[in-house]
Image (spheres, helix red, strand yellow):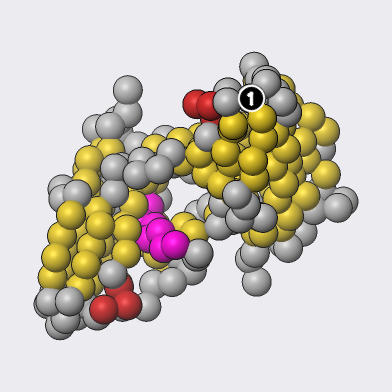
């Protein structure tokens, strides 16, 4: 089975801190995605990547950046965390371009105080 | 503007009945359509996808697509309490792009 692992289940940070959310997949998937999920707003795409060192903005990239130095790892970076970035962050991967069977990690609940 | 609309519910259906979940989308260029199920406190998991107009059946699940009317639906036959979850409709446009999700419909199957 595909496994998408997110490094932390719960994370508490202070306003202004730089935050790293890590995601690793073990099935050699080409595509990786970062979403955030908020009550009443649903899942929203932040960034995605179709190849190593490649990144594309999603619908809400402001305040975030990403890094994909290795195929299996996709990191989401909050340069200066703010309270409105308190959310559930979900990483996902899929096999090839055009394959939309997303495999999700278990999520990281980030609280910014 | 990419938009995917779903009734948030909750939608309450008696056990054994047919649950009908609906979704509309605004982008006529959308090409692929997906239904994900998300249990409380868990991550979404794919249960159905459909690319062409018409019906697609998989066990107790049937996905229906009408591109002219820009809607996609999911029918769950012989509903079970274990089907109680939030169902997310997702849409992909052509080209390099991620999925756009609706906000989800909360389905409750009453024993």
Evaluate whether residue B95 shows in this view.
no
Task: Categorize mark 1 by other alpha carbons within 10 Å: few (<14), some (14-19), many (20+).
Answer: some
Determine whether B91 is above or below B37 in the image: below
Q: Is residue A86 left or right of residue B96?
A: left
Q: Which residues are magenta?
A: A33-39
In the image, residue A95 lies at what x, y percent?
42, 35
Q: Is residue A34 magenta?
A: yes
Residue on which the image places disc 1 = B15
Residue B108 visible from this viewpoint: yes
**Which quadrant of the figure has residue B103?**
bottom right
Q: Main secondary structure of the magenta part?
A: strand
- Residue A1 left/right relative to B50: left
Quadrant position of residue B52:
top right
Q: Residue at x 46, y 57 (%)?
A: A43
In which chain is the residue bearing label 1? B
Does residue A12 belong to the magenta stretch?
no
Which of the two residues, A86 or B57, is positioned nearer the viewer here? A86
Above/below status of A98 relative to B27 = above
Quadrant showing the N terminus of chain B? bottom right
Tell which of A107 and A20 is nearer to you.
A107
Q: Residue at x 50, y 64 (%)?
A: A40
- Element type where label 1 sits in the image: loop
């Amino acid at each position: 089975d595909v496994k998408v692992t997110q490094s932390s289940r719960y994370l508490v940070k202070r306003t202004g801190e730089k935050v790293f959310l890590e995601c690793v997949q073990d099935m050699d998937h080409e595509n990786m995605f970062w979403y955030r999920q908020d009550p009443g707003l649903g899942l929203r795409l932040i960034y995605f990547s179709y190849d190593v060192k490649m990144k594309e903005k999603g619908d809400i990239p402001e305040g975030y950046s990403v890094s994909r130095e290795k195929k299996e790892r996709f990191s989401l970076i909050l340069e200066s965390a703010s309270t409105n970035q308190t959310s559930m962050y979900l990483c996902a991967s899929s096999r090839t371009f055009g394959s939309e069977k997303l495999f999700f990690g278990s999520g990281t609940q980030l609280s910014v105080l | 503007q990419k938009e995917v609309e779903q009734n948030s519910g909750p939608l309450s259906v008696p056990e054994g009945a047919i649950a009908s979940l609906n979704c509309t989308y605004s982008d006529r260029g959308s090409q692929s359509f997906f239904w994900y199920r998300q249990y409380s406190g868990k991550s979404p998991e794919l249960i159905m996808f459909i690319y062409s107009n018409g019906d697609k059946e998989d066990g107790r699940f049937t996905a229906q697509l009408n591109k002219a009317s820009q809607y996609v639906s999911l029918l769950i036959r012989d509903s079970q309490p274990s089907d109680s979850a939030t169902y997310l409709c997702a849409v992909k446009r052509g080209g390099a792009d991620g999925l756009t999700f609706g906000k989800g419909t909360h389905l409750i199957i009453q024993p």
